[in-house]
Image (cartoon, coloured by chain):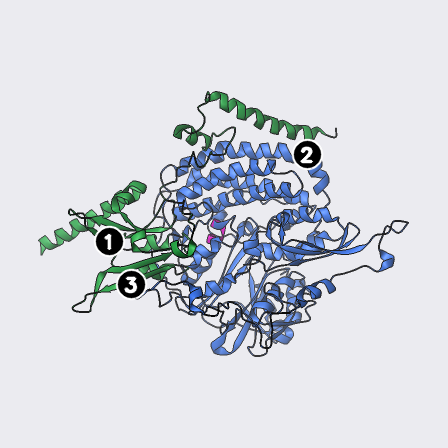
Chain colours: A blue, B green
Amino acid sequence: MTLEEYKDRFISMLNSDERKGYEGYVVHSERLVEFVRTIRDELGYDYLSSITGVDYLPDEQIEVVYHAYRSQGGPALVFKVQIPRNNPVVPSLVSIFPGANFQEREAWDLLGIRFEGHPNLKRILMWEGFHGHPLRKDWEEPYFEESEKPFSSRWPEGKAYRIEENNPFKKNVQYPPEFIPDGWVPEADTAIYSGMVRLGAEDSGNGRSLETDQILVNLGPQHPSTHGVFRMVVSLDGEEITDLQPVLGYLHRNHEKIGERNTYLMNMPYTDRLDYLASMGNNFGYALAVEKLMGITPPERAEYIRVMMAELTRIVSHLFSIGTLLNDMGAFFTPMLYALTERELILDIFEAVAGSRMMCNYFRFGGVARDLPEGVLKKVRELVTERLPRKVDELDTYLTDNEIVRTRSIGIGVLPREQAIEYSTAGPVLRASGVNYDVRRADPYSIYDRFDFDVVVRHNGDVYDRYLVRLEEIRQSIRILQQIVRDIPEGEFQTGKPQYQVRVPPGESYGRVENPKGELGFYVVSNGKPNPWRYHIRSPSFINLTAFGEMCKGHKIADVVAILGSIDIVLGEVDR
Amino acid sequence: MYGIGLLKGLGVTLKHFIETYLDDIRWLGRRYYRDETLAERQGPNARGVFTVQYPEEKLPVPEEFRCIPFLVYEVGEDGERSYRCTSCGICSKVCPPQCIWIVRSNDPETGRPIPSPTEFYIDIDICMNCGLCAEYCPFDAIKMDHDYELASYDRFADHIYNKERLSKPVTYYESIRPMNFAFEEAARAEKEAAKEAKRKAN
């Protein structure tokens, strides 16, 4: 690691993380900002991918974990800050990496870590009046049963009951002390509204005779264009957007807490429910993270099957994304259904292989759940050699040159290259802004280094380019799939015997994959027990939204929908 | 020229529009409600209208399809049910949302557990159809069903399935998953043979 060369300079700032199974460096909290600035400016770590915290309850310590990368590619630089649990304060990195904004708010919300200097340190997934920080290890929810699965009441004397019956008062909410729910006026909304940028009276209008009103508009959470339950508070000057703030958490279920209760294997079907349009890709990331901890690798055939499934998933997700983008731009459902027809054929393959169309739950540690059934390979071959290339070309003719599509999307929602990097955007959003960064190429995992494919890059960073990147990525996925159906070997699909209780040695690991939405990362900490101690997801949709407000400024209200469609969020992953 | 892209796009729509009629003509009015045509219409060579006339037509589900577990029992010669389940509890331990509840039987005389469940509940409101219970059952006693039409009127009364509601005969299992069944039977026969050989050798 090149950090070694700088050792002398950094020696006062950090120590190596010596714990067994851990990697990276422990930085002193007061030198963090200086350290991050140095690695960004002098060592080229310009992409701060993930920020999260771990609550080490037995040590009375909280650790903030950062993963930084070079946008040219290469492995991660992991650094941590250790702070006392009763007063967790770290300096905020928003001034250096604006992309840290939402992630720091999430860490504050769920773990209670205060980021000093953060411009808007408010809860993001929970509501403002919520009591406690749910990812703390000593936090318990209403209807709390046990802190680890399997629950002891299920066997050998399992008398089935509904969990609501446990609680005679039917109270499923905890309030802070002295909080009276009746007659409560939500302050949170007022706080959101007062934080919005408004222009002075002299700045509004077109400067001549036209006067405009400034209004606040709530888009969502119940609005079809938001792809789920997503809410935007938009401050408008006439029709022009002066400020936009996403309001999240309507689909929040604390996936990470559930994940820490589950055993390692139990999490696999839960990952399907993150980005539910790309469940195989989610499985992949989680399997990689845990396999890294366990130190096993899947057999050859399983690797091929995995990549095949991940690429089919990419096609599915991009088709869906193009379809909904066109929906958002007003081409009501015709392009969407043309895309969905092809998606349907791929879902048939998933159903035959994994047993379910969307919630696949197909990957296992050290392989996949079962071998490909008869006839599936033939069907994939037919699809990727004949039908899909033809249909993608058809979609291309249908949409790409369409004047309405072009007028609605060219020059809209521009995200310049530098901003795309510092906002930690990922996936097609990043690549449409001219950054040649694809995890499959930058830090190859599984067997991606064997395949011949191009990383699709475009340079304007607008809605149109994001659309084109997705379209071209479908073609590249088809290219990879053609190589897979040609090369896939016979053999085992699983290393070792299938186990329902895997042994995971203590340590930490970060598994990341290039999901259709961007870099999906799983940060898993094991303490040797059957359940993970920490299970964090770097969710690309969530982090891409950090740049959303910036992209929208100065555009018309009708463009918001198109820009959101081009980011391609899935609320299951945003809210977790 | 402005508008060329639009016209090209409309050409694609027109092609799709005409294809629906061409495909109708191709089947001479026998396009719907037949299994052969359904397979063709949903396959890689599909053209024309892609939708299925549910519930008159139903898509065939593949063998691996999974929806709600069921308990496999074998029928003896006198019509008596013998469950494969030994109430070992692995399914309820591996179940991610913890929706399986098993009451283990005890011998009334000795008080020691006997390998058969007294009661077996699955809360299908909670079940996420992941199939892990079926995958890790060492006795092939719990399997995933193919029946997906499960709507009912009263969720409080009907959605906790008991042992009776969950039980299905082994012949049913064979009919929905012939490949898996054959594979498992072969493995079992092999195991038996090995045991037999070992016993003889001793």
Q: What residue type is labelled 2?
A: Asn
Amino acid type for the residue under numbered disc 1: Arg
Q: Which of marks 2 and 3 is in front?
A: 3
Is label 1 or label 2 in front? Answer: 1
Q: Which of B201 and A239 is in front in this view?
A: A239
Report the disc number at residue A402: 2
Give neighbour class at mark 3: few <14, some 14-19, many 20+ (Cα, 10 Å): many
Asked whether the residues under the numbered discs 1 and 2 touch, taking CB atoms below 8 Å apart as contact, a structural biologist would say no
Residue beneath disc 1: B84
Q: Is residue A283 magenta?
A: yes
What chain does badge 3 belong to?
A: B
Residue ID for mark 3: B103
CA–CA distance between discs 2 and 3? 64 Å
In the rendered image, which quarter contains the C terminus of chain A?
bottom right
Callout in the foreground (3, 1): 3
Tell me, yes or no, whether dots 3 and 1 are on the same chain.
yes
The N terminus of chain A appears in which quarter of the rendering? bottom right
Q: What stretch is highlighted in magenta?
A: A280-284
Helix, strand or loop for disc 2: loop
Q: Which of the 4 image quarters holds residue A75?
A: bottom right
**Residue at image location 52% in from the left, 22% down from the top:** B22
Quarter assignment of residue B136? bottom left
Q: Is B38 displayed left or right of A461 in the figure?
A: left
Give yes or no for residue A311 being in the magenta stretch. no
Q: Earlier in the sequence, mark 3 or mark 1?
A: 1
Q: Mark 1 lies on which chain?
A: B
User: Nearest the camera: B65 or A395?
Assistant: B65
Element type at mark 1: loop
